Image (cartoon, helix red, strand yellow):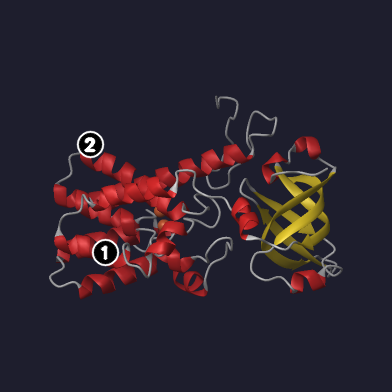
């Protein structure tokens, strides 16, 4: 049976053979207890990511050895289920010639539209009036060496905003949520400006941490250093180049970047030490968590059950029937 999109595969297909075209975004070669090699695969298209197993790794070794970057593959597979999620067992796999159009149709993209996203960025940029804070944004965000990456990269490898323009959409969401809290709680103008700068920069270094889509891996720099350190390090270097950068602004913005994951066990080396940093952390969670729930529900909307499978980052399943 030919399937148009990965999200169309549902439990009614269990134990049947399907055929689908998708990006092969990850291949991990593993060994069974009996020393047989197999491959864990992740397939992706614009609708969803699906895990697959290829037990005939040896028979397909030539194909796997010849893979470059992220190929488009056509697979025949048996539909199964593992821990409530669809899992495929590959029966046949071949690499397809790729055109740009084909790639564009397979990579998920923000549905906000680039124009709207960029207008949003501009709106918040214009709220920053203090010269050294504006210069910091000019040097890091609106700099031709980085801007293209900043507006195209995903915000995460899996979990949330893992699509084209995902980082930009996430940053804009964080700016909106953070600014709403800041104005509701009547923070001073300077606090609001610092919060905007922190929100702009908090995940900015993901442009160094991740490989560009359609790849979904980390760069060596990202694996070794991570976006929190990289972001704070580059922000500090840039602040030091700006004459007369205010010392309090420096400490507060750096603490915001370093503390935005909110807890030491979530990868932040320090806790948020200002009200701005705490707001940033909450706004970041709201943006990431809600997006992960919405996209998870959408991926599973074609399945009959009342509840989704368990969303691992939230630790629970979600009720789907109320979505109307
Ligand atoms: Fe982050
Ligand atoms: Fe973030």
Q: Quadrant of residue 71?
A: bottom right
Relative depth, front residue between 264 and 132: 132
Q: Position of residue 23 (x, y in %)?
A: 67, 57
Numbered disc 2: secondary structure: helix
| Quarter occupied by the C terminus | top right
SS category of the residue bearing label 1: helix
User: Would you name the residue on which mark 1 appears?
Assistant: 138
Percent x, y for residue 259? 34, 58
Dot in front, 1 or 2: 1
Tally of marks: 2
Res 277 seen here? yes
Give whichever of 191, 271 is nearer the camera: 191
Q: Are marks 1 and 2 in contact (CB under 8 Å)?
A: no
The image position of residue 112, as x and y in percent, is: 45, 43
| Residue at the spot 47% in from the left edge and 44% down from the top edge | 289
Quick one: 189 or 29, which is closer to the camera? 189
**Where is 142 relative to 274, above or below?**
below
Q: Is mark 2 within 8 Å of ligand 2?
A: no
Q: Quadrant of residue 69?
A: bottom right
Residue at label 2?
Answer: 184
**With 56 as the anchor, is 136 left or right in this view?**
left
């Amino acid at each position: 049976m030919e399937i148009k999109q990965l999200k169309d595969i549902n439990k009614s297909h269990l134990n049947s053979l399907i055929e689908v075209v998708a990006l092969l975004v990850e291949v991990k070669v593993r060994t069974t207890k009996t020393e047989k090699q197999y491959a864990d695969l992740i397939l992706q298209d614009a609708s969803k990511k699906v895990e697959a197993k290829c037990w005939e790794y040896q028979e397909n070794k030539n194909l796997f050895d010849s893979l470059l970057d992220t190929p488009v593959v056509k697979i025949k597979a048996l539909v199964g289920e593992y821990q409530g999620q669809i899992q495929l067992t590959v029966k046949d796999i071949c690499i397809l010639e790729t055109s740009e159009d084909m790639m564009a149709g397979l990579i998920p993209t923000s549905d906000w539209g680039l124009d709207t996203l960029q207008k949003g960025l501009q709106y918040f940029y214009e709220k920053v009036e203090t010269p050294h804070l504006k210069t910091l944004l000019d040097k890091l965000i609106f700099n031709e060496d980085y801007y293209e990456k900043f507006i195209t990269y995903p915000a995460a490898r899996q979990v949330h905003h893992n699509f084209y323009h995902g980082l930009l959409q996430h940053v804009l969401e964080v700016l909106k949520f953070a600014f709403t809290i800041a104005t509701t709680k009547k923070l001073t103008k300077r606090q609001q400006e610092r919060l905007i700068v922190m929100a702009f920069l908090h995940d900015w270094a993901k442009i160094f941490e991740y490989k560009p889509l359609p790849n979904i891996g980390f760069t060596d720099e990202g694996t070794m250093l991570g976006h929190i350190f990289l972001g704070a390090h580059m922000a500090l270097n840039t602040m030091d180049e700006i004459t007369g950068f205010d010392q309090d602004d420096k400490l507060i913005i750096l603490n915001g970047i370093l503390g935005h994951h909110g807890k030491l066990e979530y990868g932040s080396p320090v806790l948020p030490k200002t009200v701005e940093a705490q707001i940033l952390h909450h706004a970041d969670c709201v943006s990431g968590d809600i997006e992960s729930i919405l996209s998870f529900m959408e991926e599973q909307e074609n399945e009959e059950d009342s509840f989704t499978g368990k969303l691992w980052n939230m630790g629970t399943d979600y009720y789907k029937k109320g979505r109307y």
